[in-house]
Amino acid sequence: MRKLKNSELDRLNTNEFKEASKTPLIVILDNIRSLNNIGSVFRTSDAFLVEKIYLCGITAQPPHKDIHKTALGATDTVDWEHAEDTLTLIEKLKSENVEIASIEQAENSIELQNFTPVKGKKLAIVLGNEVKGVQQAVVSASDYCLEIPQYGTKHSLNISVTCGVVLWDLFNKIEKRS
């Protein structure tokens, strides 16, 4: 086996990415503190052709050197917008027929592997603050709570890891149904 060179990977350029058909997924960052986590979410969202990222509340916005360090240019490809209040954004998206799934440990949550997105409906996932998680009001307003099963001693995964696991799972489920 030989590692491939970047030139052999046949990736989209920025213009091709902007024109490409997007996965009907939106990522909502609810008061994320870590600039590195924000950058990682951009990079992962680029990988799976996510439609848009909303940066809510205290979540920092590009351009910022610490976001750029982990995003590696994905802030130039993935569409994003700042929203002052996560709950107000959730209500707006729901009025546009977008389903909302908070990624949180909650009563009646659905384990990620058991969740099937509704065909033809856009889905927004909400990722919460590194310490407090998704705000309770946002959890209450969500259509679903999705949970990644965990079997060790820790109670949560880093947001960038969570984002990768969830987007990979949903991307596969959506692509197989297309």
Image (spheres, rainbow, N blue to C red):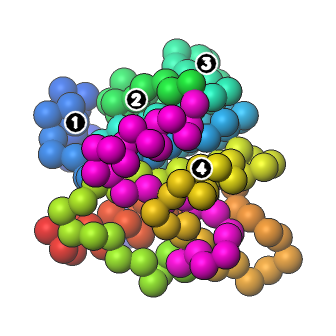
| Spot occupied by residue 129 in the image (x, y as percentages of width and height) | 71, 45
Residue 136 shown left or right of residue 115 in the figure = right
Amino acid found under the numbered disc labelled 2? Trp
The mark that comes first in sequence, 4 or 1, is 1
The mark that comes first in sequence, 3 or 1, is 1
Dot 1: few (<14), some (14–19), or many (≥20) neighbours within 10 Å? some
Residue topped by disc 2: 80
Mark 3 near mark 4, Cβ–Cβ under 8 Å?
no
Q: Nearer the viewer, mark 4 or mark 1?
A: 4
| Spot occupied by residue 99 in the image (x, y as percentages of width and height) | 37, 57
**What residue is rendered at 37% in x and 66% in y?**
170
**What residue is rendered at 41% in x and 69% in y?**
169
- 92 inside magenta stretch: yes
Residue topped by disc 3: 65
Dot 4: few (<14), some (14–19), or many (≥20) neighbours within 10 Å? many
The stretch in magenta equals 85-110
| Residue 122 image label | none
* Quadrant in the picture for residue 151: bottom right
Residue topped by disc 4: 138
The mark that comes first in sequence, 3 or 4, is 3
Rendered position, 59 above or below 156: above
